């Protein structure tokens, strides 16, 4: 559409001197044929007015996904997963399990088109700090040492600080690594005690109760 508009503007600009005389000739011809019941120029009172309000977007079909509404706000993702590459297989299993249960999951391989061309530090900060109800972190030595996971963790922790008294970060321990800024009093699940399927069931229970 933008290309077409530029083309039209270019045509008018190229023939600017002839445009006004041409309009005058059209108006003269219109005045000559109008007494005989003919006409080819539409008056403004014949033009339908433009709508003054933007029509509402169609509602999402009921039942296509579970509600993400909370008491005061809604989020694009029910849960965002943060993990190191060594835990990708575990993260993918959890993402697929939760998604099949009807919840919206931010797992990077689900959204390659969203990541393509994005300023990734800004995009990930937005996801982990603003756009998710919960953030599941796979805690491991690898996670604690990586640049990207440190960025994701810091964004999630900033959100947790803003959400005083509320639950946001849901840690899953892969090993006994400690994360900077992560209080040892936060409840966690351990891969030594639970399978991904069991964790998915507990996560679904938490999502449905909040």
Image: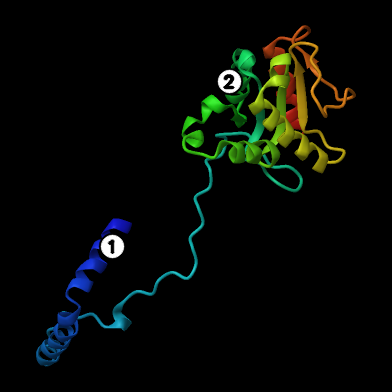
Q: Pick the residue in front: 60 or 154.
A: 154
Tell how many labels. 2
Element on which disc 1 rests: helix
| Marks 1 and 2, how far apart at CA | 46 Å
Q: Residues within 10 Å of mark 2 (few under 14, many from 20)?
A: some
Other residues around mark 1 within 10 Å, as few (<14) / some (14–19) / many (≥20): few
Relative to residue 167, is residue 13 drawn left or right?
A: left
Q: Residue at x 73, y 21 (%)?
A: 144
Q: Please state the horizontal and vertical placement of residue 111, each as a whole percent of the image.
A: 51, 31
Disc with the residue nearer the chain's start (1 vs 2) = 1
Q: Residue at x 73, y 33 (%)?
A: 154
* Residue wearing tag 1: 6
Kindly indicate the quadrant of the structure image that contains residue 200: top right
- Residue 70 lies, with reference to residue 95, above or below; the image says below
Query: Marks 2 and 1: in contact by CB < 8 Å?
Result: no
Residue 114 visible in the picture: yes
Q: Is residue 124 above or below residue 94?
A: below
Can you tell which of label 1 and label 2 is closer to the viewer? Answer: 1
- Residue under label 2, please give it: 96
- Indicate the position of residue 51 as horizontal and vertical percent values: 43, 69
Q: Which mark is residue 95?
A: none
Residue ID at (29%, 63%): 5
- Residue under the point 31% across and 82% down: 44
Q: Position of residue 183 (x, y in %)?
A: 87, 27
Describe the colour scheme in one phrase. rainbow
Q: Which residue extends farthest top?
A: 192
With 179 as the anchor, is 37 left or right in this view? left
The quadrant of the picture occupied by the N terminus is bottom left
What is the quadrant of residue 136 in the picture?
top right
Q: Nearer the viewer, residue 6 or 191?
A: 6
Q: Is residue 67 visible?
A: no
């Amino acid at each position: 559409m933008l290309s077409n508009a530029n083309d039209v503007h270019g045509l008018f600009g190229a023939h600017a001197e002839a445009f006004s005389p041409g309009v005058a000739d059209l108006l003269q011809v219109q005045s000559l044929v109008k007494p005989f019941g003919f006409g080819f120029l539409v008056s403004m009172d014949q033009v339908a007015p433009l709508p003054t309000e933007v029509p509402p977007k169609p509602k999402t079909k009921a039942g296509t996904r579970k509600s993400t509404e909370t008491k005061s706000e809604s989020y694009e993702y029910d849960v965002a997963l943060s993990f190191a590459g060594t835990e990708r297989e575990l993260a993918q299993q959890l993402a697929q399990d939760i998604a099949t249960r009807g919840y919206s999951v931010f797992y990077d391989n689900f959204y390659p088109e969203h990541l393509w061309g994005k300023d990734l530090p800004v995009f990930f900060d937005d996801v982990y700090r603003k756009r998710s109800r919960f953030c599941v972190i796979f805690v491991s030595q690898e996670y604690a040492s990586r640049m990207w996971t440190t960025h994701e963790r810091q964004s999630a922790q900033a959100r947790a600080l803003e959400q005083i008294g509320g639950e946001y970060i849901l840690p899953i321990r892969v090993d006994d690594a400690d994360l900077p800024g992560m209080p040892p009093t936060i409840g966690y699940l351990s891969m030594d005690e639970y399978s991904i399927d069991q964790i998915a069931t507990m996560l679904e229970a938490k999502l449905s109760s909040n």
